[in-house]
Amino acid sequence: MAAEFVDYIRAVARQLHLEPSQEREISLELEAHLEDKAAELQAQGLDQQAAQDLAVREMGSGVTVAKGMYEVHSPGVWRDVLLATVPHFLLAALFALHLWSHYFLVSLLIIGITLVTWKNWRAGNPSKWSYPWMGYTLAAPIISWLLALLTLGYGAWTLVTTGDLPFNVGLLLLLIGYVPFSMWIICSVVSKVVRRDWLLASLTALPFPFLTSWVLFLNWQGGLWTDHRERMQETDTDRALIFLALALTTAVFLKVGARLVRIGLLTLATVILVVITATSFPVDLGMLALLLMIAASGGLLLGPAMLDPQRNGANHPRERKRLGEVITHWFTNAR
Amino acid sequence: MHRQEQLKGNTETLLLALLTSEPMYGYQIVKVVDQRSSGYFAFKEGTLYPALHRLERDKLVDGSWQETPSGTRRRYYRMTPKGHQALADRLSEWQRFSNAMNSIMLPAPE
């Protein structure tokens, strides 16, 4: 395939953010169009290079084509919307019914969500609805990583100030091993999601700020394993409403096609819900803490954009050659 | 610019009208539009594909790959029964719109 065509199709593919099979179909269709057009222009008397250049020019902006395709193919059907909101509804129910302190029930819920996620993701082509499920599956390693890190920090501080470790060496070694291990799990999953579309990674991360702030607050209020349920249950209605709002945000996200609207929706919903979360705690966190929470949550949600390989990928000649080979491979296999 | 805006609002109806006679592939559609309109509708060819895919998503057309005797593969779009019904509705609406516009912009001499 001509280098001009590869460049053009590459420009479209970089902006598609769709399932690999859809991207393959679209690339093949555009390639067939460019080949037809260039062949006809050559038959009219243009030399090969001029014909290829004109064929690409008459296609118009690759970004516009990709944006149009994204708006057509990215919205989920109602089944996707319904399934995607289920984990948010389950969490809302957990808080509304004051069941979060029933550890057996919570464990069953985590195992159930993890199994559904694993079943959907092991095939290598996860459905649109499965990203929120992945978010809750990742919540356990992320929150435990954060708690392990805090515990290590507390241990180090105590060791420096008093000369004694507040826990035994076995636990210390376990924590030192667990922190990089859990981070490796999180990074490998996040990198996989970002490769598909960083915005889906943001959708996956949507519940993190609310789960993390709640667990940290729970910890701060006397430790995760002490009996504090009555005091914490005062905020259960607010927690339930926040998870219902997350379900609504997810539903709207999956039904709208415009990328900018999706980004705006996630950002706005996060800021509003972080403010509601902060004000719902039975203590005054202060303006600085609130601003830090908003900044951290916003950074967490929009951070995946910085990891996007499509955004960072340069149009290198080697990559161009590789893409040519990939498209040829698709073409051969599609026959 | 005005012409482009008008085309943008009616691209899908135009596509349905073209596909009602025979299945076509993308580049063929571009050529037929150019011939039938004598070059009046000059548009960026890539923008055709999101419109075709939207019609396919809404099950108004059905797309499938076919191979020509020379070995070239092309994606042909053909109308579905739902597409025929949608076209009939849109043409009827277009007729009413066109009559109303003409009655104001091109009034019959008294």
Image (spheres, helix red, strand yellow):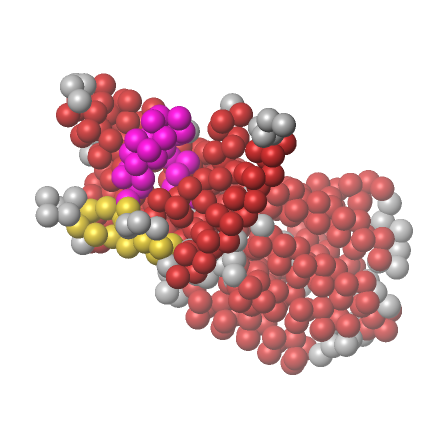
Q: Pick the residue in front: A144 or A10.
A: A10
Can the viewer see residue B1?
Answer: yes
Image spot of residue A23 (x, y percent): 36, 47
**In the displayed structure image, the side of residue A224 where residue B59 appears, left or right:** left
Q: Which residues are magenta?
A: B25-51
The structure residue drawn at horizontal position 58% and vertical position 30%, both measured from the top left corner, is B108
Residue A226 is situated, as x and y percent measured from the top left of the image, at 78, 72
- For the point 78% across and 41% down, the residue is A291
x, y (%) of residue A96?
77, 72
| Drawn side of residue B50 relative to residue A242, left or right | left
A275 or A17: nearer the viewer: A17
Residue A99 drawn in magenta: no
In which quadrant of the rendered view does residue A94 lie?
A: bottom right
Q: Is residue A9 left or right of residue A292?
A: left
Q: Is residue A199 visible?
A: no
Residue B80, compared with residue A261, is above or below; it is below
Where does the image place residue B107, in percent across and percent down from the top left?
60, 29
A221 with respect to A45 (left or right): right
Question: For residue B39: magenta?
Answer: yes
Q: As displayed, is residue A17 above or below residue A170?
A: above
